[in-house]
Image (spheres, helix red, strand yellow):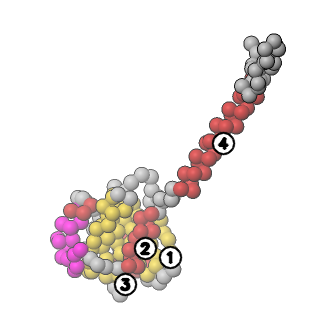
Amino acid sequence: MHLVEAEDVGPIEGEEPVVLPPRPPHRRVSVSFVFTVSVLIGTVVAIYLLLPARHDLLVTEAIEHHREGGPWEIESPSEDALKGWTIAVVGKDAPMPPPGTHVVGARQLVILKRRTALIRLQVGDDQVSYLVAHARGIQSERISRDDGDVHAEQRVKGKWTVVAVGPTATEKAWSHVLFGP
């Protein structure tokens, strides 16, 4: 079998066609391999460049919403009213702030197409944001992040993720009240 190049001009009447030997098999394989590898690398690079990283997104959102404050859907609710509101927003058995903690207000957020409860608490002299959402995927049990004058703590409690954000200077005090020792 011989290979006839497509770009070649056909033989003029009476001439013999120019027949070339076939391309060596190793050259065909190496071209296919280089093409496949370049497509795979291009796909991975495109994914990393075009899609944002989603790890620690709840912490980032909690810090952002802590800084912006209200408006609140409910203001200064009783413990029962807050529990009912939380069940309506995120479902049963959501971890609530400790009993006796003064609740300033609460509102619903949607983060990664999930309904999330954001509760603003007064812990001592500090205002602390308490965010509750269903845990999703593989998460670290504990994440801490300082962002300027605020500190965020994320904990996983069963099927729930809880993020608390408050002043960095008094982090030990409010974190101890919300998460224990």
Q: CA distance from mark 4 to mark 2?
A: 40 Å
Which of discs 4 and 1 lies nearer the camera? The answer is 4
- 36 sits to left or right of 78: right
Q: Secondary structure at mark 4?
A: helix
- Label pair 4/1, CB-CB below 8 angstroms: no
Image quadrant in which the N terminus is located: top right
Q: Secondary structure at mark 3?
A: strand
Instruction: From the viewer's side, name the closer residue of 168 and 71.
Output: 71
Q: CA distance from mark 3 to mark 4?
A: 54 Å
Kindly identify the amino acid type of the residue bearing the numbered disc 1.
Answer: Asp
Which of discs 4 and 2 lies nearer the camera? The answer is 4
Q: Which residue is mark 3?
A: 126
Q: Which residue is mark 4?
A: 38
Which of discs 3 and 2 lies nearer the camera? The answer is 2
Q: Which residue is mark 1?
A: 147
**Residue 105 lies in the magenta stretch:** no
In the rendered view, tell whether residue 89 sits above or below residue 147: above
In this picture, which residue range is highlighted in magenta? Answer: 73-87
- Label pair 2/1, CB-CB below 8 angstroms: yes
Point out residue 132 in the picture as x, y percentages from the top left corner: 33, 65
Please report the residue visible at 64 percent of the width from the left and 37 percent of the height from the top.
36
